[in-house]
Image (tube, grey):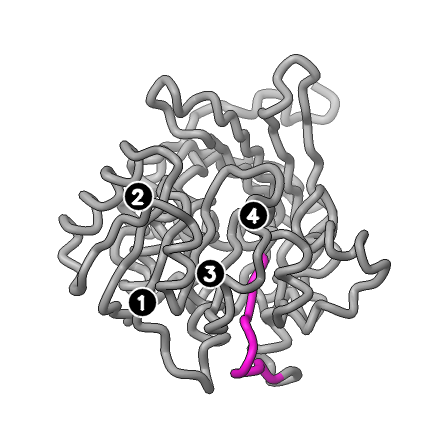
Amino acid sequence: MSTVDAPSFALVTGAQVQQVLHGREPEIADLVEAVYRLHGAGDSVNPPSYFLRFPDRPSSRIIALPASLGGPLRVDGLKWVSSFPENIGSGLPRASAVLILNDPDTGYPFACLESSVISATRTASSAALAAARLSAGRVRPARVGFIGTGLIARYLHTHLTGTGWEFEETGVHDLSAESAAGFRGYLERSGAPGKVTVHDSAESLVRASDLVVFATVAGTPHVHDPSWFGHHPLVLHVSLRDLAPEILLASANFVDDVEHCLKAETSPHLAERLTGNRDFIDGTLDDVLSGRVTVPTDRTVVFSPFGLGVLDLAVGRYVHDELARRGELHVVDGFFNELRRYG
């Protein structure tokens, strides 16, 4: 019988994750595109997410995203991410997360990473990638608008500008005036060119933007009028539940994964219920990347990404491997104790 080295286990802090990922937006964009292509080719396992809900806390949830990624990025694992909107009232971010990475040969977990930054990074990077690919062939958006101004909006702006986007104007709208002001302050400190405008309504922002980003905590649609989108913007519907089905049915719709996105009361799920079919889905982002579908230039285009666990695995593996290369992994000595089968 062959022997193997005793498995090791590392803890990766949020500070380490941020330090590794800072300024790496182009590299992460390439990584995310590679993952989408692997997923589209069937070289992944990405089962449905599991939602843990609480009868006494109906607005809160914790989600388990198990996944396995093949190809050169080979790794298994699980993201465990919570969404507690009431945190915002006490100054804490809404979401927190950890990511477990497992060795695909032994099954042993080899790292636990703080994952709120990983989750925000993969979400922002995939949306920025979608913005680039879905806007090809149309006039490149020059006016961006953010509805919802939390962590995801900030990361998405960073990944847009970090991959070459420049905007003449950036619009901001949030139900919280304090949050809108805070995001405006971030935009001004970031040094990004262009004017920053705070809008007092979602309608005003949508009508003034060529690229619209929804990054809210909305649980049900709050945007119902298709006429707001008469100028046919590109919409990054990151928060998934903002748009009424009528808006999707008047648009070209792209998702990251059809089966994942059409559930859990997302706007595409509601549109499927309303119509009884999925004909309103024009394709996946991988379809666009691979040239299997053409993105229309004369309609509103909506990208609704459910968020794939394989993306978290890839970004987490990237962080882990970079820290290992630098010799900066915090390995927990003796984490695994019972390693002899018969004692």
Quarter of the figure with residue 318 = bottom left
Say which of marks 1 and 2 sits in front: 1
Vertical arrangement, residue 132 with respect to residue 209, above or below: below
> Nearer the N terminus, badge 1 or badge 2?
2
Do tag 4 and tag 2 residues touch (Cβ < 8 Å)? no
In this rendered view, identify the residue nearer to me: 204 or 311.
Answer: 204
- Mark 1 vs mark 2, CA separation in Å: 28 Å
Magenta highlight range:
294-304
Find out whether the residues at labels 3 and 2 contact each other: C-beta distance under 8 Å: no
Q: Earlier in the sequence, mark 3 or mark 2?
A: 2
Neighbour tally class for label 2: few under 14, some 14-19, many 20 plus, Cα within 10 Å: some
Residue tagged 4: 242
Q: What residue is shown at x 54% (from left), y 71% (from top)? A: 300
Kind of residue at badge 2: Gln
Q: Which residue is identified by label 3?
A: 127
| CA distance separating discs 3 and 2 | 19 Å
Amino acid type shown at disc 3: Ala
